[in-house]
Amino acid sequence: MLLAGCAAPNLAGVAQTTHIEQVANRPIPWEITPPINYQQAVLRGTRSPTGEPGLNHWVQETDYVLNARVFPLSGVLDGSGTVTYTNHSPATLAQLYMEITQNFHLPGVRRAEAAEVTGGMLVRRVVVQGEELPFDPFSEGPHYRISGTNMILTLSQPMAPGETVTIDIEWRFDIPRVGAGGRMGRDRDNLLFLAYWYPTMAVYDDVAGWHTEAFTGISEFYHGFADYDITVEIPEGWIVASTGELQNPEEVLAPHILDRAHAAWESDSVLQVIGPEDFGEAGTAMTDDGLLRWRFVAENVRDAAFSATKQSIWEAGRTSVGDRNGDGEEDFTRINTFYREEAPLWANVTEYQQHAIRYHSANTGFAYPWPHMTAVEGAEIIGGGMEYPMMTLMGDYNARGDSALYNVTAHELAHMWIPMIVSTNERQFSWIDEGFTTFHENDARMDYHPGLNHYLPDQQIYTTVARQRIEGAIMRHSGYHATPLAFTIASYMKPATMLAALRAVLGDEVFYEATRTFIADWAYKHPYPWDLFNTFERVSGRDLDWFWRPWYYETWTLDQAIEAVQVEGGETTITVRDNGLAPMPVFLGIELESGEVIGRRIPVTSWLNGATTASFTLATDSPVVRVVIDPENLLPDVDISNNNWLRDEEALTPYGSSD
């Protein structure tokens, strides 16, 4: 028998007294102080000290009308578009910043990892409010210049609060085989996945202003929300899927394929839309010039990606997302899966997507808001997975198996909530989106594959690295960890582990209320870490600086140990020593000779005066035969060898069992 989180211990018939050592011989976590620009945002009323957006909160507004002409055989994309940008900030903007991620592939740019050199993105023309800007890095008048993955537009007239400008732009680039650090590209002459394919407005927010940090390949992206109208021009025979709703399906799909798609999108079962017999021109409409123009529209998304495939099986269905509109009716979204015959495990991915979207909608308390979710297999472009609004690109997982393929699907689809709905700064604080997503992935795995502790592997990986003292602090800037391993642990495993630990501290009800409140409050906005911290403190009604400081700002570790168990008559005194620096409550399971198991919790306040030991005495009718610290492995203890005490060392039985 395992204790249910030790939240409601059975203490009937048990007398107890507690003694806490009062010697201050350990560091005590000190309060969290946000940086000055965040404090100023609170004073301006765009943020609040309790974690909600302030009454004066604002976000910038962008509309994109984008055209991509794709040449699959030569691997070239010609692009043009109109960007309409509205300044909702109180600042006057003399310059506008755009990001050109494809310049990660320029020769000579700063990269954190090796990359194919393609020449990056060639910007052919930039026109602002009808005025063509020259490319002139040294001009003092209106012009544009490019620096790595940034493009800076100097305006002829500064942009006042409330004003809107229109930017017309043309560009071209060679599509890399493996692009943007394995997040887009082309493969086998039958698949393209286009992400970061257009110049994007950089984020201008209320805390830091313009975000102009270069993309170097490891830490990811920070995007604003926008409306998109996208046209992809490509030869017949290529099936295009994209962020957004397809506006002209009858113009681009063969009639029998469109009929199958409509049937699948109304089906709870998985149906095939395109099979091998439909590959190529049999699956699409025909035109006089041999080109199809696929048009997609999306509202309030933070990015747009599309795929084009010529020899992929297309399977589809639908899944429930709950009540999206608050009208009491069940709502659904479409599920699409594209995979090549060399990826047979992908025959299950539509089902995986159906479960993940349905589960995450319920678990986050925020119904999936978009018309579809589409997964694309891209084995030689990517090994793991990468997320975009309504789209994900994932490897074939032939060598890793079905369970791993479900796990990555649940992970990438969890990203639809953070950072796709709650737009965090992945480049600086990758732990917010990756930590929450890894935690939510593990939640979904518990539901899809019950019977295993799916939180434990991340905890074990983190504690292994922590014991070697090679981790970096979670709050370290994501792009500046000492090693790729330190980045990975601080972004994925440790923050997911700490969310599981915080759930154990607060209890399921309070923890999930705080998580859902954070998502609801910051949907379609840009939270910072201190908004997250303050939200949890507001919802829980607790000061949690003692938790944030050691686990997020420092690399302190937890090592609780049973120091002594003394039995005198009917009384048992248990002494716990805290050998680590990170204070946490102690969850104890105490087994009696009768087979009864009782729970005991030593509160975290026991350590917050500097104490390193705590003792308490129990009076029981049956003798204590075993004491275990954290029997459910809820907390990341770096040394569990000292977490058990047995009255009879040779009578080791599974915890909680009896004859």
Image (cartoon, helix red, strand yellow):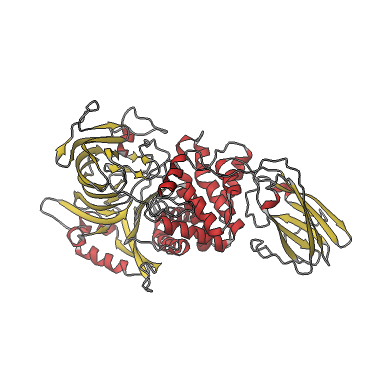
Q: Residue furthest left?
A: 288
Position of 513 with respect to 216 (left or right) is right
Q: Which residue lies furthest to the top in this view?
A: 138
Q: Which residue is drawn at 38% across and 30% down?
A: 110
Q: Residue furthest right?
A: 569
* Percent position of residue 142, x then y: 20, 33
Q: Residue furthest bottom?
A: 328
Position of 607 with respect to 366 (left or right) is right
The reply to whether residue 656 is in sight is no
Q: Which residue is drawn at 39% across and 56% down?
A: 523
Give the vertical position of 608 relative to 1 (above or below).
above
Residues 587 and 639: in front is 587
Q: In which quarter of the image is residue 654?
A: bottom right
Residues 215 and 537: in front is 537
For the C terminus, the image quarter is bottom right
* Percent position of residue 490, x then y: 52, 42
Q: Quadrant of residue 473?
A: top right
Give the vertical position of 595 relative to 70 (above or below).
below
Residues 146 and 494: in front is 146
Q: Residue at x 32, y 69 (%)?
A: 266
The reply to whether residue 225 is in sight is yes
Position of 171 with respect to 403 (left or right) is left
* Percent position of residue 378, x then y: 36, 48
Residues 63 and 261: in front is 63
For the N terminus, the image quarter is bottom right
